Image: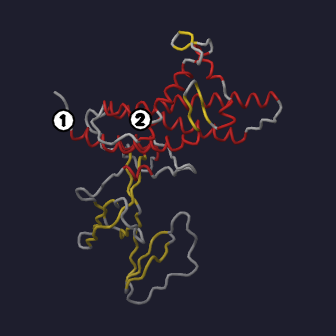
Amino acid sequence: MRVKLEERVGRLLWVRPLDSDESEPSEPINARPGDIIVPFVPIHSTGINTNATVGDTTGFMLGIPVVEVRRDDAQREVRIRTRRLGEPEPSARVRVPWGYKVTFGPGDVVVEIEWIDQMFPAGDDGYSPLTNTIWTWMNIGPAPNSETVTRYFLAAARRLDTAHRWFQRVRQQLDDFDPAAPGPHARQAVFEIVGDIELTVVALSRAIDMAIKLSELAPISTSVPTSVVSAVVTLTELRNAYEHIEDRAQGRVRMQPDPQALTIFDWSSLFQDDAITYAGSRLELKNVPSILLDTRTFLKEAAAEAKAIVQATPPTI
């Protein structure tokens, strides 16, 4: 085994195995008479898994950084705890001398939803997928009778993530659109953009509906952001038009003739003004990223609160 000198403390030479991506030391370890070499294993974090099989990465849920609480040389034991969010990061990993055991005490493992949320970095627009965060949070120490709330949050988060993916696709397509392209190519691009707009609107509107109705399922105090609430009417009108496009194609709304029905087929504002319009409703594309982010923040904060409420609520007998 190749090792590296981590630190000399008096006569103690702390040495550890090389990390997998670490190059060979350029200099040998200089041990003098009377020095004590202390080989140790560095520990950066602890993992939470769905099973107890060592090395089975399919069961991995979350890794949380750890810090040392104390080392008991008489008992050959190192006690550690998870690092709290916002706590300064130590300059070095926890050192566990060979032959020592690692222990956690009561309350030493604390899971915070923000640790989970950092697993997938945000993109240029500040958005990162939410569904895995929700799933992991709700499934670590799940509370009795929490299945309904968990399914609800997962469905809302999945719809929101879907809306974000489709909107990113729309944004790229609009940026790349060439109105001077040959007719068939330009028309095909238009049809694809409108189709993706349709999927974006439906998924986003449904996700926001679920977010607003969440308080009917769990008595949460987290407020739905004003930017989200103010978008509901417009998104609902657009969504209804797209979900009932067979009616709009026949000039009808709720099976009745309506002079505004065919406006859903007017795409000029989309390509000229970056806006989706229908009848008297108008959604500016520049506002969509903030709606997505605000809805995401709400769902994450509401999930953190809802889990605590469910855990504190005794089951109905």
Q: Earlier in the sequence, mark 2 or mark 1?
A: 2
Give the quarter of the image for residue 8. bottom left
- Which residue reaches farthest top? 256
Q: Residues within 10 Å of mark 1 (few under 14, many from 20)?
A: few
Q: Position of residue 137 (x, y in %)?
A: 36, 44
Secondary structure at numbered mark 2: helix
| Relative to 78, 248 lies left or right | right
Give the quarter of the image for residue 7. bottom left
Q: Position of residue 128 (x, y in %)?
A: 51, 46
Q: Residues within 10 Å of mark 2 (few under 14, many from 20)?
A: many
Where is 108 relative to 165, above or below? below
Q: Position of residue 79 (x, y in %)?
A: 28, 64
Tag 2 and tag 1, C-beta contact below 8 Å: no
Give the quarter of the image for residue 250. top right
| Relative to 193, 126 lies left or right | left
Q: Which residue is mark 2?
A: 154
Q: Amino acid at mark 1?
A: Pro
Q: Amino acid at mark 2?
A: Leu
